[in-house]
Amino acid sequence: MNSRRGVWWVVGVGLAISLLLAGAVSFYASSAPDGLDRVATDLGFSSTAQDSAAAGSPLAGYGLDGVSDERFSVGLAGVVGLAVTGLLAFGAFTWLARRSRRPGPAGRSPIGDAPTS
């Protein structure tokens, strides 16, 4: 198997596992308060909590707004979150890869002090 094909195979398997975890297993995540909520409760200032600016967004509350089945709503929100995060990471890595191929001033790489070859 050539190395490029092997990389795409690993990426495909990783994507499939990620989709499975985000779509199916995320519903079974703990419903206990997260660390910040727990500390606020323990220290007695949880009553001062306010909704975030994103409280009315379609993905607020770890579910997809407008989907009545809770299990499907949580799974779909996980898949949407994975897709958005993946697209942002892909865009950032693509931009960085293109930027690192351009020689900087005096033949230096724009990302570090290593000379370009």
Image (cartoon, helix red, strand yellow):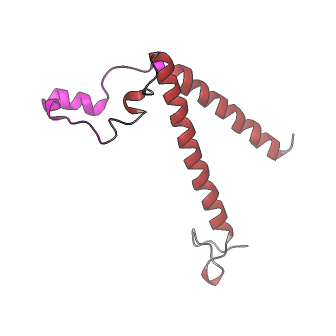
Q: Tell me the quadrant of the picture where the C terminus can be found.
A: bottom right
In the rendered view, tell whether residue 87 sits above or below residue 43: below
Q: Does residue 75 appear left or right of residue 10 in this picture?
A: left
Q: Tell me the quadrant of the picture where the N terminus can be found.
A: top right
Whether the magenta-drawn stretch holds residue 66 is answered as no
Q: Residue at x 79, y 40 (%)?
A: 6
In the rendered view, tell whether residue 104 sits above or below residue 29: below
Place of residue 8 in the rendered image (x, y in percent of width and height, measured from the top left): 75, 41
**Which residue reaches farthest bottom?**
106
Place of residue 102 in the rendered image (x, y in percent of width and height, measured from the top left): 67, 72
Q: Residue at x 58, y 42 (%)?
A: 86
Q: Residue at x 76, y 36 (%)?
A: 9
Magenta region: 27-53
Whether the magenta-drawn stretch holds residue 43 is answered as yes
Out of 27 and 112, give the one closest to the viewer. 27
> Which image quadrant is residue 50 in?
top left
> Which image quadrant is residue 52 in?
top left
